[in-house]
Image (spheres, rainbow, N blue to C red):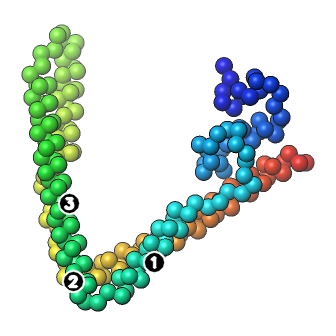
Amino acid sequence: MPSGYTAPICEGEVMFRDFLFRCAKAFGAFVSIRDEPLDESIPDQIEPSIWQRKQLQASFESLIAMESWDNDAWKEATITDYVKKMQRRQEAAEKNTVLLDRYNAMLEKARAWQPPTDEHQGLKDFMIKQLQESIGFDCSTDFTEPRQLNSADYRHKRLTCCLADIEYNAKECLKELNRAKERTEWIQALKGSLDA
């Protein structure tokens, strides 16, 4: 049975160049176009992803916005952040309480189940163990209460995080540019090998 790469050979004459490029799509240089149809043409150049650049831009915009905040804006942001953290904590506790009830209901059924044979006892034990472990991992409602920072500490924390994001995203942008350059060189070398 032909693969997606060899199927065109079964259908008729295929140029080596076309087969080579079709197979080349399985390699790392084409990670950004790997999901494109196999018969789609090979680009001469791989463009860097713009995702990281957008993240870098968003980090800069956040920094610029925060730098313009006055003391009142920082106080308001501090309170808003604390309220959101408290809401998320409450929502997580409620969600985990519901999940605990569901797990406990199933655990009760698993414990009450009578295996049809001794050979099925392992299945019962396994089900109970899975539920108990899931309860331990998924159902904590004992969350540490968020600490409300004063506006100066909150400002320092937010600006420090923002600067760290800028540094990280700048490094990742450079890595992406290098990856695109290396992939383009790989493609150009591949295409050049056919012209020789």
State if disc 1 and disc 3 touch (CB < 8 Å): no
Question: Which sits earlier in the primary sequence, circle 3 or circle 1?
Answer: 1
Query: Separation of disc 3 and disc 1 at Cα?
Result: 27 Å
State if disc 3 and disc 2 touch (CB < 8 Å): no
Residue 1 as seen in the image, left or right of residue 116: right
| Mark identifier at residue 75 | 2
Question: Which sits earlier in the primary sequence, circle 2 or circle 1?
Answer: 1
Residue 76 as seen in the image, left or right of residue 49: left
The residue type indicated by label 2 comes to: Lys
Mark 1, residue position: 60
Quadrant where the N terminus sits is top right
Which residue occupies 17% across, 75% down? 148
Q: For this rendering, which residue is in front, 139 or 123?
A: 139
Query: Separation of disc 2 and disc 3 at Cα?
Result: 20 Å
Mark 3, residue position: 88
The residue type indicated by label 1 comes to: Phe
The residue type indicated by label 3 comes to: Arg
Which residue occupies 16% across, 47% down? 96
Q: Around disc 3, counting alpha carbons within 10 Å, would you say few (fewer than 14), some (14 to 19), or many (20 or more)?
A: few
Residue 128 as seen in the image, left or right of residue 6: left
Question: Which sits earlier in the primary sequence, circle 2 or circle 3?
Answer: 2
Identify the element where label 3 is drawn.
helix
Q: Is residue 151 visible?
A: no
Q: Around disc 2, counting alpha carbons within 10 Å, would you say few (fewer than 14), some (14 to 19), or many (20 or more)?
A: some
Give coordinates of residue 41: x percent, y percent: 73, 45
Give coordinates of residue 21: x percent, y percent: 75, 41
Q: Is residue 23 visible?
A: yes
